[in-house]
Amino acid sequence: MTTYRVCCFLRRFRPASNEPSEAIGNVFEAYDGADGGGSALGEEALRRFLREVQGEAGDDDVEAAAREVLAFAAEHRLLKKGGGLTVEGFHRWLCSDANAALHPRRGSVPLSHYFIYTGHNSYLTGNQLSSGCSEAPIAKALRDGVRVIELDLWPNASKDEVEC
């Protein structure tokens, strides 16, 4: 079971597999040869990954992030004997809370602290059950500050156009 914290509640999922996905394996392979060792992500390759993929900027931030990753790997016994992060360790770290998008070191706050102005059924000209739709209410919502719009699209009777 994997537990994810979302806002103020926990959600548990049974992973389909404990193996790294093909996409994670491909990213790992792209960086694991950077130190010349192969099959393990060395410190320099990890720093390069943190800069190029994770978007860490500045040498101090990259070093701090690399130390955190290696500390996580050491704590969970995910380092190879000769050093470096295994693909399993890389996968476990990527999917752990230690690699959360909203991370305290990056100065973020939980998603629940943000106000996101969204539009639901923004295309409707009246009530949800019997009104028509138009692009005018969408344009008005965007002018009013809405930044996320929901659109329901349905094929017409002849299935050659889309209706809202």
Image (cartoon, rainbow, N blue to C red):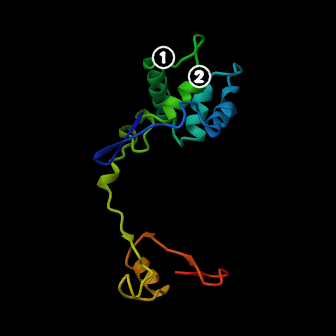
CB atoms of marks 1 and 2 within 8 Å: no
On residue 138, which mark appears? none
Residue 57 position in % (x across, y down): 52, 41
Q: In this image, 90 relative to 27: left or right?
A: left
Residue at 70% x, 26% y is 33
Quadrant of image for the N terminus: top left
Residue 97 position in % (x across, y down): 41, 35
Quarter of the image for residue 128 reads bottom left
Residue at 60% x, 26% y is 87
Number of labels in the image equals 2
On residue 86, which mark appears? 2
Residue at 47% x, 31% y is 65
Quarter of the image for residue 114 reads bottom left
- For the residue pair 132 and 109, the one nearer the viewer reads as 132
Disc 1 to disc 2, C-alpha distance:
10 Å
Q: Amino acid at mark 1?
A: Arg
- For the residue pair 81 and 125, the one nearer the viewer reads as 125
Picture layout, residue 155 above or below residue 49: below
**How packed is label 2: few (under 14 Cα within 10 Å), some, or many (20 or more)?**
many
User: Disc 1 on helix, strand or loop?
Assistant: loop
Residue 136 position in % (x across, y down): 46, 87
Residue 44 position in % (x across, y down): 61, 26
On residue 77, which mark appears? 1
**How packed is label 1: few (under 14 Cα within 10 Å), some, or many (20 or more)?**
few
Q: Amino acid at mark 2?
A: Thr
